[in-house]
Image (cartoon, rainbow, N blue to C red):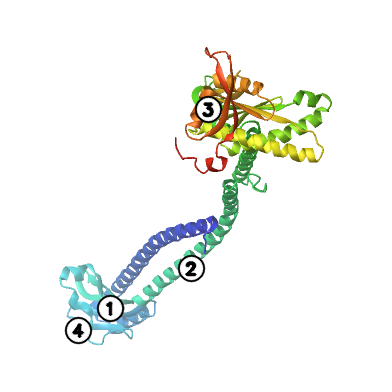
Amino acid sequence: MKWHFGHKLALVMTGLVLIASCILGYSLVHRQFALLENQFAQTGTMLASQLSAGSVEGVFTEDELGLASLVNSLNENLPVAAAALVSRDHEILAHAGRDLPMHQRDLPMHQIESAEAIRTGGSVRGRGDIVWFHAPVVFQNVVGATAWVGLDRSELAAGKNRVVYSGAIVVALLVLTITLAAIRLGRSLGKPVNDMIQGAEAISSGDYGFRMQDHYKGEFAALADAFNRMAADLEQKLRVERTFSRFVSNPVAARYMDKEPSDLGREGCREEASVLFADLSGYTAFSESRSPEEIARILNLYFARFAEICHSCNGNVDKYIGDCAMMVFGCPQPDKDHRYNAMTCALQIQQRIAAFNEERRRENLPCLDVRVGISSGIVLAGLFGSHDRLQYTVVGQPANLAARLCDLADADQILIDRDFYQHVAARFPVQAHTTRRIQVKGFSNGVEVMIVKGWMHWSDAGAAFPASA
């Protein structure tokens, strides 16, 4: 059985009340017992004193009839069990009560060891439940006898039992009342707590649409409102992240999403990466006779395939520029095989777009060919722009050269530079040949341009791809 918050609260409250009631009850019962004992002793002492005072004349005049009458009248009072008058010679002058010993040696007089004790009076414990109280019978400073009154302690014990029984009933009623109140309070407090737990579990599992019902009062109403606002903010944040991830790649979004705006620096950092430009050949003529809606629809068909292939090759779509897509491999997440991935992406784009165009031609639909330029090297990667508008991209000679190679390529052609070719061919044989040398700003000796035909053994290239450089 799972103990919920309400059950635990009720159990704790009941336990605390029970402990407090037991401590308080013990203190009260102990005090009541002391009062009963004191009352019992005062009663015995008073009755013994009354018997002593009333028997002075009879003792010194030896009025046995008067003494007997006095003793009998006293014995009729509760809780007197017996009464007696005993002379200085330890002879019984008068007695009453069925519990009274019939021989003077059975009286507890032998427990009184001094004459001073006889003169001052007191009490001694007798046989059974009888307590004997004694007081001297004195006339003109002469002790003529001792008055004995025996009280039955069974009445005192019965009184103590009644006190314990009454206290137990009071404690039981108090604990029962508090338990019922604690159960009700636990349920009223446990319901919103359980709802909070359920809501936390829902949020942790990704259900940001969970909301607490608005039927609480007091602090729980404020707590439920705060929880619902938090859930709404998380849901809004999730929507923003999903929307944001459609404008930038997931690695870029993951890198900058949790940073404060003040931490978004614009200086960038140096990375080794490969840059690929893929341009749709014949776009200008294609767009002249078509509506913007149709142009956008067809562009999205091609761009969707670019993005799918790029992501499958561990690349990121940096941006779309008109009919051109810029893709980056090796940043923001480092990739030591960025050149191989860029080369693979270019060849797959070439093959996939060719197959896609073949399908469209069979359906008599317009087609656009693709041309690709690739280069690699050290780039500056980071956020560029103004405080109001930032964009993650890469800048540097590899990006400029890749864009220039893309412009020089013919339809369905992939152009690379000699340096890129040498890095890739050192590990994977590439079918490529030099076409010409071009002058590019930043390259004093010009750039040797090469046309890529494919992997020398395409089927083996992927299988032979090592885990590290």
Q: Counting residues from the N terminus, which is met first, the one under dot 4 or under dot 2?
A: 4
Q: CA distance from mark 4 to mark 2?
A: 46 Å
Of residues 382 and 335, which is closer to you in this image? 335
Q: Are marks 1 and 3 in contact (CB under 8 Å)?
A: no
> From what the image shows, is residue 399 above or below residue 9?
above
* Location of residue 233 by image quarter: top right
The label number, if any, that marks residue 169 in the structure image:
2
Dot 2: few (<14), some (14–19), or many (≥20) neighbours within 10 Å?
few
Q: Are marks 4 and 2 in contact (CB under 8 Å)?
A: no
State the residue position of label 4: 105
Q: Nearer the viewer, mark 3 or mark 4?
A: 3
Does residue 457 appear left or right of residue 110 in this picture?
Answer: right
Of residues 217 and 458, which is closer to you in this image? 458
In what element is the residue under mark 1?
A: helix
* Location of residue 291 by image quarter: top right
Is residue 257 something one can see in this rendering? Answer: no
In what element is the residue under mark 2?
A: helix
Q: CA distance from mark 3 to mark 2?
A: 97 Å
State the residue position of label 3: 421
List x then y, in percent, for residue 310: 61, 35
Q: Counting residues from the N terminus, which is met first, the one under dot 1 or under dot 3?
A: 1
Dot 3: few (<14), some (14–19), or many (≥20) neighbours within 10 Å?
many
